[in-house]
Image (tube, rainbow, N blue to C red):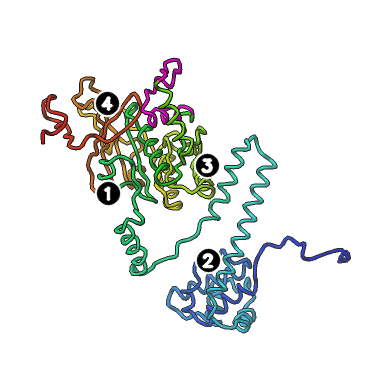
Amino acid sequence: MNVPETFDENNLRVPPHSIEMEQSVLGALMLDNEAIDRIGELRAEHFYRYEHRIIFEALAKLIMSNRAADVMTVHEALSSSGRLDQTGGLKYLNSITGNTPGAANINRYAQIVVDRAKLRQLISAADEVQTEVFHRNGKTAEELITFAQEKFEPLSEGRAEGPRFIGQFLTPVIERIDQEYHGEAPQAISTGLRDLDFKLGGGINGGDLIILAGRPSMGKTALAMAIGEHVAETHGPACAFSLEMPGAQLTQRALARQGDMALQMLRNGSRMSDSEWPKLTHATQVLSEMNLLIDDTPGLSLVEIASRSRAVKRKHGLKLIIVDYLQLMTGGPNERHDLRIGSYSAGLKELAKRLDVPVIALSQLNRGLEQRPNKRPMMSDLRDSGAIEQDADTIIFLYRDEVYHENSPDKGVAEAIIGKQRNGALGTAYMTFIHEQAKFADLAMGYVPTPRTAPTKARGFSDD
C-alpha cells in the first residue's frame, strides 16, 4: 500500500495502552507467583491485548489454586482449555518471561496497565456522550448533561485501598479524639438546638445520612432549614435542594426566623408596621452574609444532586446538604417506586461518605398512623421504610401534639423522636415551635414533658 508523504502515524487514534507493561506484569507473575499480592486493583479486563487477558486469567487461576504458575504450567493450562492458539503458544510465553527484568516493580507495571485502561474507558464514555448529543432523540440539554454525568461518574470513583490492620486506623482516630478534647476540632456539627444536640451526642457528623420524617404540617422543612442556617452561620457553607418549596418562600421563612417577625407579615407587606422595619433590615443583613445556598430546581435526580453538591464543595466548601424531600427525587421511569426510593437513600448515603458531610433528607410518613390513638411516629410508619431504615445512620421523627389536639397540654412543644441512631441511644429531644415565625428554639431549662398517661393538667416546667 502506498502511504502519502504527509502521513503521520502519530495522528492515528490508537487507544492508550502499553504492550510492554502488560508483558512485564505477566512475566513478573510467572517469575514470582507471590507478586500477585502487589498488583492492586488490576483485573483481566484492564489488559488491552486479548491474548494478555487470557494469559492473566490462566495465571491467576493457577496461583489462586495454590499451584505453581510458570511458563510450562501456564502453557499446559492454556492447552487444556483449548486457548493456547489464541495466545501465541509456548514461544510467546518464553519471550514474555525472557524480556521481563523481574518482579520487584510489578506494582508500578500494574498501575500503568490500569491507568491506560481507565483512559480507554474515558474515551469510550466520551464517544457515547458525543453520539447521544448529536442524535439527541428528543432529549433536552439538561437530560443530555445528566446522561453525560451518569457515564463519567463511575470513572471518578476510586477503589478502596483494601484490608488494613486495625492499628493503621489508630493514629487518625487518636488525633481526632485529642483535638476534640482540646476543643480544636469538634467532630459533631451543632444543629443549633441544645436538647437535640445532646440526644445526638453533640450534633450531626460528616458522612452520615440523617432522615427527618414527619406527617404534613409538623415543620420538617422549617427544622431542616433552621439547622441549615445555623450550620451556615457557625460552621461553613450549607446547600439545600428544595424540590417542593420555591426559594423565595424559603427566604421569607428565613427572614421571619432571623428577624423574630410574623411570617404572615412578610407574606403581605401592607401589614408591616414602622417598628418592624429595623428587624427586617437586621434579618436581611444576616441572610445576605450567610453561607447558605438554595437550589429550588424541581424533580432533580440523584446524579444531579450529587454533581451539584460536588461543584459547591469545589467552589465554596461544604458542611451540610439538605434534600427536601426524598420522594420528590426523580429516577428511571421503569423502576418500581420502592426500588427508586431505595436507590435514592443509598445514593445519598454514598454522597455523604464521599464528600464527608452530613446529608439531611426529609421523608414522608404513611398516613396509616392517623388511625392510631397515639400518633407519634414509629419506624414502621416510614414510607418505603425498608431501604430508608437500612441506609440511614440516624432517623428523626418530628411530632407536634397540637397538630392533632387543639387543646393539647404541650401546645408549642415539638418532639424530635430519635427512632434510629447508629452510634448512639434512642430517645426524644424537646424544643419549642413558634408557628408564627416557622421557628424552632430551645425550651427553658427544667422543662418536663407531659406523661402520656397523665391528666392533661400535668404539664409544663418542674417546680425545682
Q: Nearer the viewer, mark 2 or mark 1?
A: 1
Label 4 vs label 3: CA separation? 35 Å
Q: Is residue 383 above or below residue 75?
A: above
Residue 415 x/y as whole percent: 25, 34
Mark 3 Cα within 10 Å, few/some/many (few <14, many 20+)? some
N-terminal label among 4 and 3: 3
N-terminal label among 4 and 2: 2
Residue 145 x/y as whole percent: 60, 42
Residue 437 x/y as whole percent: 35, 26
Label 3 vs label 1: CA separation? 32 Å
Q: Which residue is mark 4?
A: 370
64 relative position to 405: left or right: right
Q: Which residue is mark 3?
A: 304
Q: Secondary structure at mark 2?
A: loop
Magenta region = 248-274
Under mark 4, the amino acid is Glu
Q: Which residue is mark 2?
A: 43
Residue 201 numbered mark, or none:
1
Mark 4 Cα within 10 Å, few/some/many (few <14, many 20+)? few
408 relative position to 383: left or right: left
Asked if the residues shown at circle 4 and circle 1 are in contact, with their CB atoms under 8 angstroms apart, the answer is no
- Residue at image location 50% in from the left, 33% down from the top: 296
Q: Nearer the viewer, mark 4 or mark 3?
A: 3
Q: Residue furthest top?
A: 270
N-terminal label among 4 and 1: 1
Label 3 vs label 2: CA separation? 31 Å
Of residues 247 and 25, the one drawn nearer to the viewer in this rendering: 247
N-terminal label among 3 and 2: 2
Of residues 158 and 385, the one drawn nearer to the viewer in this rendering: 158
Q: Quadrant of residue 177?
A: bottom left
Under mark 3, the amino acid is Glu
